[in-house]
Image (tube, grey):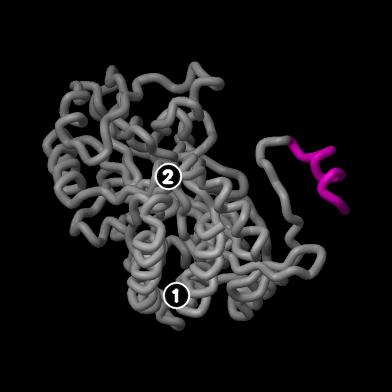
Amino acid sequence: MNNQEADQYLLHTYNRSILFTKGEGMYLYDDQGKKYLDMGAGIAVSALGYSNDDFKHALKSQIDKLIHVSNLYYTEPSVNAAKLLCHATGMDKVFFTNSGAEAIEGALKLARKYAYTKNPTSGGEIIAMEHSFHGRTMGALSVTGTKHYREAFEPLIGGVSFATYNDLDSVKALMTENTCAIILETLQGEGGIHPATPEFIKGLRALCDEHDIALILDEIQCGMGRTGKLFTYEHYGVKPDIVTTAKALGCGIPVGAFAAVEKFAAAMVPGDHGTTYGGNPLATAAICKVFDIFKKENILEHVNTIAPYLVDSLNTLAQKYPNKIKEVRGMGLMQGIELSVPAGDIVTKALEKGVVLISAGTNIIRFVPPLIVEKEHIDMMCDVLNSVFAE
């Protein structure tokens, strides 16, 4: 197989380059046998790196038992995964999906259904954030706050307005009697690696309590240990009404979820929502094993130990290249550097030198490595970046 053949048959929605054939630990290998250090983790998915034996054995064991039955029946992995996720999030009920975008769709439906149960004439209005990213499906796209993602696909779902992230007054200005939910990423990813301020998160929580509307926190990218706690909102001492998760939840097995506190969860009744594949035994066995490995291998403790080293290393680069690096920001192992040069050029040159990086927008490189990253990997990446910036 070659890239030309791939482009003949695959829809051209990505500018692909390399053909990867296998992975091991922190490394990927292409079809020529070249080794690459992966500091993007498949866009924050492969938290355990590649080819974790414990994870693989759990999946193989489940494949030998049962891969799929419909959601008309219970399965042991789905019940166990639901229990684990409810305990981890502080929520009461969970619905498993196939992706993060589907988790957002379900969260929006749940918020609107709750408002409808209170008032069937509710307008179901939703306040989202500028520069947010929640997914590519029509509902998730409707609350994604970057115009160029939306405009070719309009009209999208109505009743959505966009506030300024970290500006509580801008949210209050959009509130009406028809507002049913406020949705945001606890730490914006695609929009530029912007953490929420404590004042903003706590202000939103109070606002939602006051008006009895849903606070939806999107933790699809920043959750599952990425910032040093299982979910980023734990840093703020607040709890959402509905939370979405995916990406590292299955560490490569496609699975997502939305979870809610009982008051909101109770609004959904049989027939309101469904999925054919969501929460099947293979996907939920993956979730169970991810939580097991996180605990056994002290993943959160490792993130909190190694993240300051990543931040210090990036700040050292920024001090060395002040004309190219404008700012370092983020939380835990979700960091970004804002550049005064195009991020794509840096990413491409780093890839040529054997380091996989990803951008966020046009001028930000985001660092979301597997959570098993060590100092040696950070040093290796910084050596490559140093040589790229020097060029």
Q: Residue furthest bottom?
A: 296
Task: State the residue position of label 1.
Answer: 294
Q: Position of residue 206 (x, y in %)?
A: 13, 43
Q: Quadrant of residue 291?
A: bottom left
Choose mark 1 or mark 2, whichever is in front: 2
- Left or right position of 209 against 282: left
- Residue 279 or 14: which is nearer the viewer? 14
Name the amino acid, label 2: Ser
Residue bounds of the magenta highlight: 1-11
Per the picture, the main secondary structure of the magenta-coloured stretch is: helix
Q: Residue at x 47, y 67 (%)?
A: 80
Q: Residue at x 72, y 50 (%)?
A: 17
Judged from the image, the secondary structure of the residue bearing numbered disc 1 is helix
Whichever of labels 1 and 2 marks the residue nearer the N terminus, that label is: 1
- Left or right position of 365 against 162: right
Judged from the image, the secondary structure of the residue bearing numbered disc 2 is loop
Name the amino acid, label 1: Phe
User: How far separated are the C-alphas under marks 1 and 2?
Assistant: 37 Å
Task: State the residue position of label 2.
Answer: 340
Q: Quadrant of residue 251?
A: bottom right
Q: Where 35 sits versus 164, above or below?
A: below
Numbered circles on residues, count: 2
Res. 167 in view: yes
- Residue 344 or 316: which is nearer the viewer? 316
